[in-house]
Image (cartoon, rainbow, N blue to C red):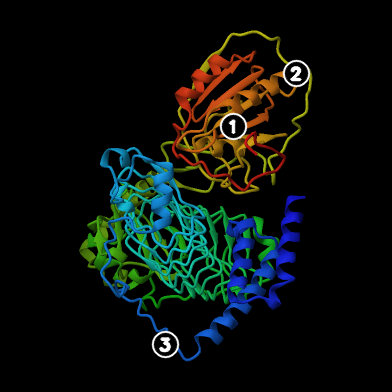
Amino acid sequence: MQKIMHLFAVLFLLGSFTTKAQTSLQGQIDSIMTLYPNCMDYPVEVLTSLDSLFKLLEAEDVSVDDGHDHDHDHDHDHDHDHGEDIDFTQLSDPNLIAHLKTNFPDLLNDNNQVNPDQVSEIILLNLDNLNLTNINGLSQFTSLKTLSVNINSITELTDLPDGLEYLYARNNQINFLGDFPESLLKIDLRSNDLTYVNPFPNSVKDLKLCFNNITTVPDLPDDLEVFYCAYNNLTVLPDFPSKVETALVYNNEITEIGVLSPVLNQLRIQSNLLTELPYLPETLTNLNISNNPINCVRSYPEVLSAQLSSFSTCQDPVIESQEAVNPFAFDMSAGWNMFGYVCPDSADALAALSNIKDFIVIVKNNEGAAYLPEYGFNGLGDLIPGHGYQMKLTDGVADFHLCDYDLIDSDHHSDVEDVNTALLDSIENLNNKMGCKDLLATNYDEVALYDDGSCTYECSETWDDIIDYSCKGTAYAASCDPYIVYRKSTEANHIQNPGGICYDVHPPASGSHRPMWGKWGKYDYMPPQRYLHNIEHGGIAILYHPCVDASVIDALEAFACARAADDGGAFRYILTPYHDMPTNIAVVAWEWAYFNNCVDVAGISEFVDEHYRKAPEDFYFDGTYDNLFQGRCTD
C-alpha cells in the first residue's frame, strides 16, 4: 500500500511538470528520490518517470547554457578556483553556525570558534535539510565518526575530519571533492553534480554514486562490498575488488566490464551498451542485462541458464603458442587454473611467464607466495621443477607450456622421472589444500587454502524471510528468572534476497543479514535477517513469544517509549514477535541477549544501559525496510 501511495505522489508531481521552471523539475526529481532513496528501490514506473524528468532537465540545461563556456579540466588534481581566499578550517555557513549554537550551546564562542573540549565529545552530526551551502570548519570535529549532510545546497565537499567513517551527502549540488579521509567506511554521494570522483580509501565498504554525471571511476577500494553507480555516464567498469557482493550500474553507457568479484551476488547493468558479458561468478544469482545489445556470453552459473542460454558463446582470444609440439602443453581457460612446472631447470617467474603476463591476474604456490604482474611484484622468485602452481587469467590461453622439450639437453633426460614424481606430489599437495571456504556453508573447511566450489548450504532461499509468526501453543509460565548470554560474532555479511540465511541459535544476536535494515519501531513481525542489521547499527531488538498476553507487549512498548533520547537521537528499538523463543521475552543487542519470562523493567533497563549503541556501527537513520511496520511511539 505504501508503494502505491508513493507512486501516486510521483504521478501527481509529474502531472504538473510541463508548466514548471527548471528549478521545479529538479525539485520533482528530489521529491521522488526522497521517497525512494536507494538506487535499487525504484519501481519500473518510477524509473520511467525519472527518465522523462531527467531528459526535460537536460534539455533546459542545454537551452540555459547555450553560448556559455563550461569546459572544465578535471584532470590531475581537479584544480578549483574559488575567486577569493577562503579559510576552509573555520565555520562560515550561517545556518550551520545557528544549528550548532542551538544544539550544542557551549560549543562556540562569540567569534564562532569551537571549544576543543566540547567538540571532542561529538561523534555524530545530523545536518540534513538545513539549506547549508558549505561545511567549512568541520575538520575541527576531530572525534566525528558519522556526518550526514543530505538535502542541502552544498557545492564543494572539503575539510572533512580525519577520523570520519560514515559520510552521507546525497541530494546536494556537489561538483568538487577534496581528499577523502582514509578512515571512511561508507560514502553516499547520490544525486549531486559530480563529473569525476577522487580515489577512494581502500577501507570503504559501501559506495553510492547514483544520479551524477560521472564519466570514469578510479580503481575501486579493496574492501568494497556494495557499489551503486546507476544513472551516470560511465563507459567502462574497472575490475571489481574481491569482496564486492552488489553492483548497481544501470543506465550508463558502459561498453566494457572488468573482472568481476568472485563473491558477486547481484549485478544490475541494464540500459547500457554491452555487446559481451564477461565470465560470471558462480555466486551470481541476481542479474539484469535488459536493454543492452548483447551478442554473446561466456560461462555463467547454472541458476542463470534460463536467462542466458539463448545467447551464443563468445570466443576468447588466444595467444599464439610456440610452434613446436609439446607433450606437456594444454589449454587454459579464463579464471583459475592449476599447472605443474615440468621444465628441468628453475626459471624466474617474470621471465618464464612474460609472454602471457598481460593475461595474468595472479600466480600462487602452495605456500601462498604470489606473482602479481600488474604491480611488477614477484614473490614467487623462481618456478621450481616438479612444483605445482595456481594461476588466475583474464582470458583463455591455448597450448600453454613453459619450455620446448625438443630443445632439452639429453643430460636432463634421466631427471624426467624424478621431476614427474615431484610434480605429482605437488599437485596432490594442492588438492589437499582445496575445499569449501564459505563460513555460511555446512561443509566449511577451515584448513582449505583455495575454494573448489564444493560448498553446500542448509538454508533455503526465500524472497521475504517472512514465516508464520502467529501463536502456536501457549506462552511460558510467568516467572522472573533472568539470564544473559554473550556470543561473539563470527561474521556480519550482507546477503541479498533470495539467498538463504539461517541461524544456529534462536534468537540470534549477530550474524549475516540483509543489506537494508528496517525503520525503527514496532512490527507485526520483523525477521532476524532484518533486525540483526538494526542492532548492528547500535539499536535494541525487543522480542516476545507470539503467545504472550497483550499486556506483556504493551509493557515492552511502554518501556521503549519511555527511554529518553540522547545525542544519537530518539531511542532506537525494534519490537516484534519471534518464533522458537526459549523464554517469553528477549532483549537483544549486538552479541548480547537478555532473557526472562516476565517484564522486569529494572533488569531490562540495566541491560539496555550496558549495551545500547555498543555495536560495530552507530546509525540513528531509519532503513527503508517497512514490511509489516506498525509505527513508532515518537510518530
Report the front residue among 238 and 620: 620
Residue position for label 1: 503
Identify the residue at the far front of this view.
Answer: 110
First of labels 3, 1 by sequence position: 3
Disc 3 packing (10 Å; few <14; some 14–19; many ≥20): few
Residue 223 falls left or right of residue 436: left
Query: Which residue appears at 63% of the width and 62% of the height?
Result: 31
Name the image quarter holding the C terminus.
top right
Mark 3: amino acid: Asp
Position in image of residue 499 (x %, y %) = 62, 46
Disc 1 packing (10 Å; few <14; some 14–19; many ≥20): some
Query: Which residue appears at 32% of the width and 58% of the height?
Result: 159
Q: Is residue 85 positioned above or below 451 on the image?
A: below
Q: Is residue 521 positioned above or below 55 on the image?
A: above
Q: Quadrant of residue 16?
A: bottom right
Q: Quadrant of residue 376?
A: bottom left
Query: Which residue appears at 60% of the width and 22% of the height?
Result: 586
Residue 434 falls left or right of residue 548: left
Q: Secondary structure at mark 2?
A: loop
Residue position for label 2: 549
Position in image of residue 74 (x %, y %) = 36, 76
Of tags 3 and 2, the one toward the viewer is 3
Q: Secondary structure at mark 3?
A: loop
Mark-to-mark CA distance, 1 and 2 = 27 Å
Mark 1: amino acid: Tyr
Mark-to-mark CA distance, 3 and 1 = 59 Å
Q: Are marks 1 and 2 in contact (CB under 8 Å)?
A: no
Of tags 3 and 1, the one toward the viewer is 3
Mark 2: amino acid: Asp
